[in-house]
Image (cartoon, rainbow, N blue to C red):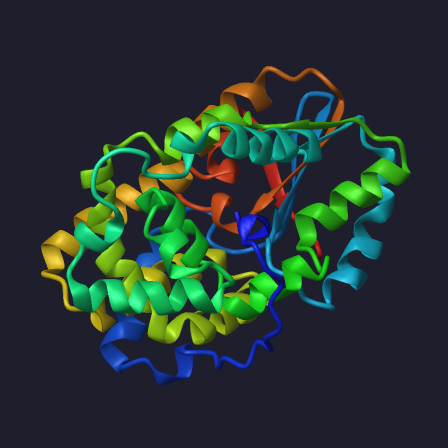
Amino acid sequence: MAMMAPVALHAACSGADLRPQLSTEARAEIAERTAALPFPEGNHWRATRGDQTITVIGTMHLHDPRMNDIVDRLAPTLASTDLLLVEITAEEEAALLNAVSTDPTIAFITDGPSLIDRVSPKIWAVLAEAAQKRGVPPFMAAKYQPWFLSMTLSIAPCAMADLHAGRVGLDKMIMAKARQADVPIMALETHREMIDLLAADPVDEQVRFLPLAAQMEGTVDDATATTIAAYFEEQHGALLAFSRVFTRDQIDFPPAEFEALFDEMMGTLLDRRNLLWMDRIDARDERSIVIAVGAAHLGGETGVLKQLETRGFTLQRQPF
């Protein structure tokens, strides 16, 4: 989504890890939630069932120079595999961009009031400024579908500048390495499935998430720094728990309403996609497969690791 911003950006990521600032109560809740998750740690796993081996790599879509060494360490595994499965291939990404550009209704409000008239002036002022920082003029952002604007604002301006400059995340670096080794690459979901999932709710339902996006804008750089730090610590389960606890404590939402919204968001972005992917993974008969997906998809009851275990695979954590 960041690549759809109309102008290039120049910004340095200068956020701070938020975890040291947490209260004792918040730390305790995060630890309790993390302990309850299956497979909350580790970015590199090997799953075996009979003569089939699946290597699972948790990626990060943001860029970091340390990923160069990680890709070099993974290169022998990638070169020897029969198939690489990723969230979205270059072909599906191109199809997604083409779909949005040829069918404005996918990402834009083409009928009815714009977002300016659907949120309060205070919320819109924050959203408009946030869009501007990411290279999206407010008049254009006002016509974005709410899901599309929320996704755009979830990327910090500094991270979006990296994408515009061609500095990609680990998933794309892995795909490049696989192409060099002539390894087939397949997507776990189509661009149409992704669109249908994200845009499933009516606009009025999607608008409910915009105050959440606006209120989190003030900490987006620090949240990005926290995400990167937790990723290299291989603490994807704790990061999800942190996201819930920190966000809930920072925003002006009734706790019950926030929990419902957060669960709905995780259900859309993680749970439903994980289960769809697993049906496709389980249907593959290649003897050696590498799966490279965002690290947030690895842990939890519906996570890729637990789902592989449920399907009879034996899992072993590997060095990352």
Q: Residue at x 37, y 74 (%)?
A: 219
Q: Nearer the viewer, residue 159 or 320?
A: 159
Please identify the quadrant where the C terminus is shown: bottom right
Q: Residue at x 40, y 52 (%)?
A: 140
Task: Indicate the position of residue 51 as horizontal and vertical percent values.
Answer: 74, 21
Please indicate, yes or no, whether residue 245 appears anywhere in the rendered image.
no
Left or right, 176 with respect to 316, comes to: right
Report which quarter residue 186 is drawn in: top right
Report which quarter residue 129 is drawn in: bottom left
Residue projecting furthest to the right: 181
Report which quarter residue 240 is drawn in: bottom left
Count of picture labels: 0
Q: Nearer the viewer, residue 297 or 123?
A: 123
Q: Nearer the viewer, residue 313 or 107?
A: 107
Q: Residue at x 34, y 46 (%)?
A: 143
Please indicate, yes or no, whether residue 173 appears anywhere in the rendered image.
yes
Task: Indicate the position of residue 62 as horizontal and vertical percent values.
Answer: 60, 59
Q: Nearer the viewer, residue 311 or 294?
A: 294
Residue projecting furthest to the bottom: 21
Q: Residue at x 82, y 38 (%)?
A: 178
Left or right, 47 with respect to 36, comes to: right
Vertical placement of residue 173 versus 101, above or below? below
Task: Indicate the position of residue 259 as horizontal and vertical percent values.
Answer: 19, 53
